[in-house]
Amino acid sequence: MTRQPDLIADVSEILLTEEEIQAKVRDLGRRISDDYAGRALTLVSVLKGSLPFMADLMRSITIPVQIDLMEVSSYGGTATETSGLVRILKDLSSSIDGRHVLIVEDIIDTGLTLNYLVRYLRGKNPASLRICALLDKPARRLVEIPIDYRGFLIPDQFVVGYGLDYGETYRNLRFVGVLRPEVYTADPD
Ligand code: 5GP
């Protein structure tokens, strides 16, 4: 029988509260606004996990920006592990040729997804390409990724909330929390 998720009970620990996240996003927005003043900036975010972060970050930025959205899926891994094989489900809508591009990512774990994305976007001739990641989980990094704007360093735990899912659920939590391991060991998706 399929287990019904319980958004609150399935989280064993709140790692980042809504207030901590919002304060950090405002701070990142201020820094990005200062650094990119006078430049043609495009924020590129990666669906679906980065959606709340992108929505909050863009509204914390006080200079003109364009936004674009990509959707990628990794395949060949498991529900909680990425494989590095990435498929583009939705590509950019507009050209980034000559624009300053900032990738807005929810979390960097092994770095394989972003490594692929950076190489892909570099091929589209942006004036510059940098990375803003809300969460950095360096314990399992397999490729070096220069993170220009980092929100929080987090330990090697599987987290959900503020866009991050397990089995497409938990994205609408306003905080970031640790998912009880029983949830994904008892019910492999
Ligand atoms: P990477 O390619 O860096 O290993 O992983 C990137 C993607 O894996 C993230 O965009 C996210 O979708 C997923 N991911 C990695 N760690 C976590 C985690 O702790 N929780 C959730 N929900 N997704 C994660």
Image (cartoon, grey):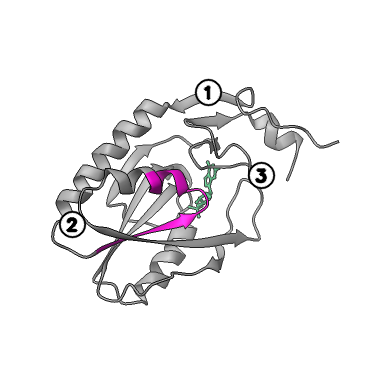
Marks 1 and 3 sit apart, C-alpha to C-alpha, by: 19 Å
Marked residue nearer the N-terminal end (1 or 3): 1
- Whether residue 108 is visible to the viewer of this picture, yes or no, is no
Residue at the spot 42% in from the left edge and 72% down from the top edge: 120
Q: Which residue is mark 2?
A: 36
**Label at residue 13:** 1
Residue at the spot 20% in from the left edge and 53% down from the top edge: 63
Q: Using a 10 Å C-alpha cutoff, classify the residue at mark 3 as few (fewer than 14 neighbours), some (14 to 19) or many (20 or more).
A: some
Residue 139, percent from left and from top? 45, 42
Amino acid at pointer 1: Glu
Label 1 vs label 2, nearer the camera: 2
Marked residue nearer the N-terminal end (1 or 2): 1
Residue at the spot 37% in from the left edge and 77% down from the top edge: 123
Amino acid at pointer 3: Gly
Instruction: Tell me if residue 167 comes above or below residue 12 in the rendering.
Output: below
* Residue 48 counted in the magenta span: yes
Q: Are circles 1 and 2 on residues that touch, CB within 8 Å? A: no
Q: Which residue is mark 3?
A: 167
Q: What residue span does the magenta drawing correspond to?
A: 41-55
